[in-house]
Image (spheres, grey):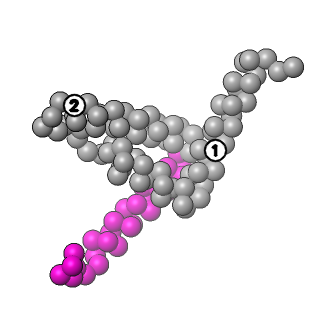
Amino acid sequence: MRTRRQLIEDATDQLKADFRALMNAPAGRRIAAWLLFDVAGVDRSSFANNDRLTAYNEGQRFVGLALMRHLKRIAPGDYHKMLTELDHQNDVIESAPQTDED
């Protein structure tokens, strides 16, 4: 019978493997970037004109920063690759011609 400590270590190892699998796939890196930058807003201010909205924004940002720390620690190469791919995507969008509908 496995001990509680062994079960916790197994769960931690599985979570690390899951993070690596996520970041190893292009789709996973796109999802991680979306969660970090669009949903959690790790690269923007949490401040809003309303105290409750500021607290809400800061809560989202806190979760995003925790995710970012894990990704950097567990899959640092893939984290850097995600940022490079995101920069490239942003460059492509910025260089695309605008239309009246934009």
Nearest the camera: 55 or 75? 55
Q: Does the magenta-highlighted stretch encompass residue 91?
A: yes
Q: Which residue is at a point 44% across and 62% down the rendered structure image?
A: 85
Above or below 23: residue 58: above
Q: Which residue is at a point 63% across and 37% down the rendered structure image?
A: 15
Q: Which residue is mark 1?
A: 18
Q: Which residue is at a point 54% across and 61% down the rendered structure image?
A: 27
Above or below 29: residue 72: above
Crowding around mark 2 (Cα neighbors within 10 Å: few <14, some 14 to 19, many 20+) is few
Specify whether 42 is left or right of 53: right
Q: Earlier in the sequence, mark 2 or mark 1?
A: 1
Q: Which residue is mark 2?
A: 52
Quadrant, the C terminus:
bottom left
Q: What percent of the width, then of the height, locates residue 11? A: 69, 31
Q: What percent of the width, then of the height, locates residue 3? A: 79, 17
Residues at marks 2 and 1, CA–CA distance in whole angstroms:
34 Å
In front: label 2 or label 1: 2
Q: Is residue 65 something that shows in the picture?
A: no
Going by the numbered disc 2, the residue's amino acid type is Arg
Would you say the magenta stretch is mainly helix, strand or loop?
A: helix
Crowding around mark 1 (Cα neighbors within 10 Å: few <14, some 14 to 19, many 20+) is few
Q: Does the magenta-highlighted stretch encompass residue 99?
A: yes
Q: Quadrant of residue 93?
A: bottom left
Q: What percent of the width, then of the height, locates residue 45? A: 23, 41
Above or below 17: residue 92: below
Specify the segment rendered in magenta.
Answer: 76-102
